[in-house]
Image (tube, rainbow, N blue to C red):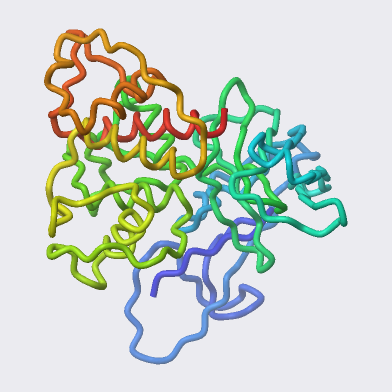
Amino acid sequence: ITLNLYVDDAEHLRWNTAADGSGTDYAVGDYYTENAEITLYAIWEELPSEESGGGNSGRPAASGGSSGSSKPVEDAKASAEIMPQYEQQDATVTVTENADGSVTISATDADGKAVELKDGVKVTLKGDVKPGQVLVIVNEDGSETVVRKSVTEDGSLTALLDGGATIKIVDNAKTFPDVAANAWYADAVAFVSSHELFVGDENGDFNPKGTMTRAMMAVVMFRLEGEPEAGEGKSFADVEAGMWYSEAINWASATGVMNGYGESFGTNDPVTREQMAVLLYNYVKSLGIEMKEGSAMNFSDTDEIHSWASEAMAWAVAEGIFQGDTEGKLNPTASASRADVAALMQRVVKLLVK
């Protein structure tokens, strides 16, 4: 049995057969074979408080949850506003900074009743916010949910909420052995992994050069939108019920974010860059956001863009989501790598919250 125990302001020293620590010791992390029932007690040592000069114990942050180290950014100053698309609803938003470092946002109508505004409350927390730190909603049961539509810039974090919530900033940084700190995609990988849009593979790698399939892309978009319930989408011959991608593809089809090829979704097909432009265009448009008119595309391979993707690609270029390579090409028909998609997703989220 493996147990990882963490208690605030205390360090787990060892296991012992007696509650007072006077029995037989068992070291933390070692392996033992016992042929009989045994009761072990965790022995702790209280750590010095920050006020007395003590630092971090060096023990690892809890893993497996969305909260990272779950340490709110100190002295973060919060503000909130209603997004322009909801200005006619006469909604009011208030901000309360709590003693524990969290912030409570309230969104109410003219009668003081709570209102739900899809992506309608823009929250900004100014402080020493670092890459890898994200905003989480503190649920009533104490669990935390990552706010995926959030960006960090110049030490501040800006996010979109659907209404009132208690929030805080936590460290949710991930590291991957195959992502060098100086790689062009390192920042984008840090963004999508801390926002839990992407996860690593079974070896703990990010696999930045790996190909993104259309099923993978549907899952990423589904996560960005908070994995909502959706109406019944189109049935596809290559989409089996109960698969890891089934619910996401149903949502993508029902909302018009992604469409298939006739009777097939192309589940395992690599997603191309022009397909990416179309699905991102469809997604942003589905949110009711005013779409910027596309501009002329001065790339040497624009003639390779299919007619069904030209409007979306022109929009994506105008918004700065798609950029040319060092040779001045868009490579519209090329397969998108995981690193490519990470960069595109980071830019799209910035577009949504700006």
Quarter of the image where the N terminus is located: bottom left
Image vertical order of residue 327 relative to residue 202, above or below: above
Left or right side of 251 for 12: right
Figure check: 189 above or below 204:
above
Percent position (x, y) of residue 334?
13, 29
Tell me which residue sits at (73%, 36%) in the image: 81
Which percent across, then down, holds residue 119?
59, 45
The image quarter in which residue 241 lies: bottom left
Q: Residue 176 sits in which quadrant?
A: top left
Front-most of 271 and 258? 258
66 and 114: which is toward the camera: 114
Image quadrant where one finds the C terminus = top right
User: Does residue 153 appear to the left or right of 272 in the view shown?
Assistant: right
Task: State the image coordinates of residue 215 (x, y, percent, origin top left).
Answer: 23, 53
Q: Which residue is drawn at the image coordinates 76% and 50% (left, top)?
A: 107
Q: Is residue 119 left or right of residue 330?
A: right
In this picture, is 292 found above or below 45?
A: above
Residue 121 placement: quadrant: top right
Residue that extends furthest to the right in the rendered view of this protein: 111
Q: Residue 80 placed where, x, y %?
A: 74, 37
